[in-house]
């Protein structure tokens, strides 16, 4: 599995989820980056540096940093394995922009 470039992100498409890597969340050369920085500053949530998001059913579980290699190895095992990886690392690397954890029904 490989990430493909999509604007300023890289995307790893899977069957029923995807992984999104943003190398520079504070990049204001894209309208989304400028808006994210403005909103983040308004509410006290800084938007700096790279982040990797696990995207399931419109929810974004975001880890600060570059986790592409780890997710690329885990992704073939499915979204539950990726969610386990996210949960294992969220205490130390969770982004304040992450959605809340999914309902237990998703993770069964």
Image (cartoon, rainbow, N blue to C red):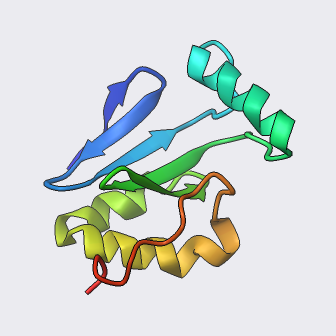
Q: Nearer the viewer, residue 70 or 108?
A: 108
41 versus 93 height, above or below? above
User: Is residue 1 left or right of 90 when viewed as pictured?
Assistant: left
Decide: is 96 above or below 101. above
| Residue 86 as seen in the image, left or right of residue 4 | right
- Residue 103 visible in the shown view: yes
Looking at the image, is 68 positioned above or below residue 93? above
Q: Residue at x 63, y 33 (%)?
A: 24
User: In the figure, residue 100 lies in which quadrant?
Assistant: bottom right
Figure quadrant of the C terminus: bottom left
Foreground of the two, 50 or 108: 108
The residue shown at (77%, 26%) is 38
x, y (%) of residue 106? Answer: 28, 76
Residue positioned 20% across, 69% down in the render: 78
Image coordinates of residue 40 in percent, x first then y, are 77, 38
Return the x and y of residue 7 as percentages of the image width and height. 42, 20
Give the x, y percent position of residue 94: 63, 64
Residue drawn at point x = 53 percent, y = 59 percent: 99
């Amino acid at each position: 599995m490989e990430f493909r470039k999509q604007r300023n992100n890289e995307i790893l498409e899977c069957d029923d989820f995807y992984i999104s890597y943003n190398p520079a969340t504070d990049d204001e050369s894209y309208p989304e980056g400028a808006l994210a920085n403005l909103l983040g500053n308004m509410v006290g949530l800084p938007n700096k540096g790279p982040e990797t998001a696990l995207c399931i059913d419109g929810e974004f579980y975001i880890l600060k940093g570059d986790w592409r290699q780890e997710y690329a190895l885990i992704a073939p095992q499915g979204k539950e394995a990726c969610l386990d990886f996210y949960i294992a690392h969220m205490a130390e690397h969770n982004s304040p922009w992450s959605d809340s954890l999914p309902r237990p029904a998703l993770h069964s």
